[in-house]
Amino acid sequence: MTELSTATTPAVPPWADPEAQPFLRLDGVSKSFGGFEAVRGVTLDIYRGELFCLLGGSGCGKSTLLRMLAGFETPSAGRVLIDGEDQAGRAPHDRPTNMMFQSYALFPHMSVEKNIAYGLKRDGLPRAEIAARVADILALVQMTPFARRKPDQLSGGQRQRVALARALVKRPKLLLLDEPLGALDRKLREETQFELKKIQAEVGITFVVVTHDQEEAMTLSSRIGVMNAGEIVQVGTPHEIYEQPHSRFVANFIGSVNCIEGRVTGREGGHLRIACPDLGAEVTVESGFEAGAGEKVALALRPEKIAMGRTARPGFENMVTGRVEEVAYMGNLTIFQLRTDGGARLRVTQSNTTRTDADVPRIGENVQLQWTGAAGFVLGA
């Protein structure tokens, strides 16, 4: 049987342990094509057993970075080390990696089991070992009943599982996945995200996934590296990336956010006071952000952190009045676009916890918008 990981989640994750050694290290890696620098001086540590996502928009350099890990591109500068070994000069087939492409690249004339076995046969493994490995991996991805089918007899989700099985059956130390779920429809993609996460935990192999889908990265990953213009601008857990973004780019790229310009008027303990003319109010934010009086900053508020009602409620440090301009019912939640008395346009989301909408504010209504000092975060100008 294929050896599965029996490791338990450590009390301290490896990236927070100063004694932990990275399994994959990128040391000042850059890649230029002519005069265009696609990847710029990326330094990054990824630890054994992680499911790490490289997240960014089209053209940010994430796929180029993945191809350098695989050996399909040579860095213009910097080093790639896997398990302590420099990969410089190593061809893709000589690296302890395998890659799953977005197109799946299955052989149309071969059955599922022959597609999976192809790489093992090329490596010259004994027939009995190949059969055992293929049987094990088919069971792992729940494709045993489809072993004799051809790719054109499978659904998109089934082809995705075959491609994953073919990549895993060679037991690489590092599996690279380029937009692995991009060809699936939304519902199937959401279901497959959890399956992929479960399989990765069972086999214990380090995964590096490239995706442009924020929700996919948040669902799959132990940590995320957000890329922009060839650089990694922030690395963190999904919670850290969402709740503690380091820049306006990250805050806007991950989820939805309201950014309101303001000036610091002072500090009281752990709270900053910020005057926001567009809100028509001075607000307080629980923040360690270092800023002096008069300095320009932005107050960032996620839509779900704002409480909305026809009357004010106790327990909130901040309150402004807004007028409902647009309402979008999304099933599990409702999105409201509002205009404050000061002119700021805010987005607010509310979970639909009941089947009726009798209490939902209507377009044109005035409402009270409230939030706590801990709800927002401060970004530099």
Image: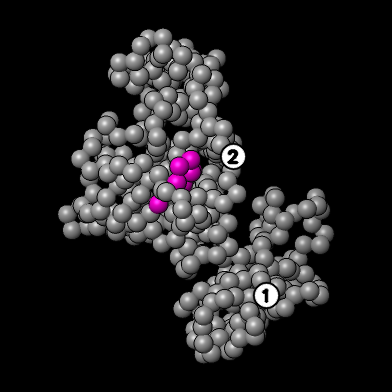
Q: Nearer the viewer, residue 363 or 76?
A: 76
2 or 1: mark nearer the eye:
2
Residue in the foreground of this view, choosing between 61 and 334: 61
Give the class, few, some or many, for how many residues have Cα within 10 Å of label 2's Cα (few <14, many ≥20).
few
Q: Residue at x 45, y 39 (%)?
A: 206
Left or right? Give the position of 354 relative to 8.
right
x%, y% of residue 349? 67, 61
The secondary element bearing badge 1 is classed as loop
- Residue nearest the viewer, comparing 358 with 271: 271
Q: Is residue 186 left or right of residue 77?
A: right
**Along the polypeptide, which appears first: circle 2 or circle 1?**
2
x%, y% of residue 280? 64, 85
Q: Looking at the image, is 226 positioned above or below residue 367? A: above
Q: Amino acid at mark 2?
A: Thr
Range of the magenta residues? 45-53
Marks 2/1 in contact by CB < 8 Å: the verdict is no
Residue 180 location, x and y as percent?
Answer: 44, 37
Among all residues in the image, which is located at the extreme front? 19
State left or right for residue 225 relative to residue 355: left
What residue do we see at 59% from left, 75% from top? 287
Q: What's the residue type where badge 1 is placed?
A: Gly
- Residue 133 falls within the magenta-colored stretch: no
| Res 229 → quadrant | bottom left
Q: Is residue 247 at least partly visible in the picture?
A: yes
The residue depicted at 30 percent of the width and 47 percent of the height is 80
Task: Classify residue 23 as left or right of residue 190.
Answer: left
Question: Would you name the residue on which mark 2 appears?
Answer: 8
Q: Position of residue 310 (x, y in %)?
A: 79, 72
What is the distance, in whole Å, between disc 2 and disc 1 at their CAs? Answer: 37 Å
Seen in the picture, residue 6 relative to 120 is either above or below; the reply is: below
Q: Which residue is mark 1?
A: 373
